[in-house]
Image: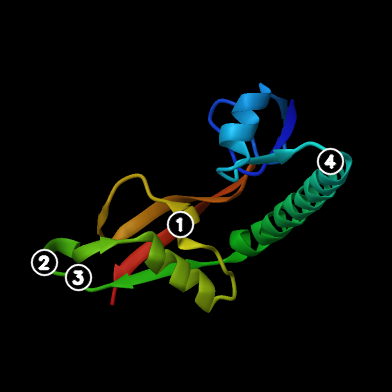
Amino acid sequence: MEVILKRVHKTLGNKGDIVSVKAGYARNYLIPEGLAVVANEMHRKVAQENAKQAAHKMLKLKADAEALLPLLAAAKVVVRAKVGEGGKIFGSITPLQIAKVLKEQGIIVDYTKIAIDLPIKQIGNYQAVLALHEGVSYTLTFDVVPA
């Protein structure tokens, strides 16, 4: 029996995949649990349209991410932090602080997409990797200065 998966299933496949399973498994588990629907003509058309829309959305998100690259290259990022003796920062610099500085310059980046290798606890020059989209990333150089 062929079914269309409504969610990602670790052994069968991804959302929207058409898979062949035993009829009992489909009727007694997949369909009642809301994991799949029977692959009839109507459901196949809906799945194809959803896949087409998802592909279009992914292309748009990638284009938006690539449009941010020149803005990031032109940005001068300076993070201000309270500093104690010897240039040591109270706490550490977080991706959220970097995202706020970028937002002040009109560049909106989700802070969960910013990766910092080591905790930043001193003033100086550092780098962070921004994973803007699958296959689109940017290494941002920023300065940490006393507030």
Residue for point 66% across, 56% down = 69
Quadrant position of residue 11: top right
Distance in Å between CA atoms under marks 2 and 1 = 31 Å
Q: Residues within 10 Å of mark 2 (few under 14, many from 20)?
A: few
| Residue tagged 4 | 44
Seen in the image, is 5 located left or right of residue 87? right
Q: CA distance from mark 2 to mark 3?
A: 7 Å
Q: Which mark is residue 83?
A: 3
Viewer-nearest of labels 4 and 3? 4
Instruction: Give me the residue at 67% from left, 56% from top.
Output: 65
Query: Along the polypeptide, which appears first: circle 4 or circle 1?
Result: 4
Kindly state the secondary structure of the residue where label 4 is placed. Answer: helix
Left or right? Give the position of 116 relative to 66.
Answer: left
Q: Amino acid at mark 3?
A: Val
State the quadrant of the C terminus. Answer: bottom left
The image position of residue 92, as x and y in percent, is: 25, 61
Return the disc, 2 or 4, that comes first in the chain's sequence.
Answer: 4
In-front residue for pair 115/74: 115
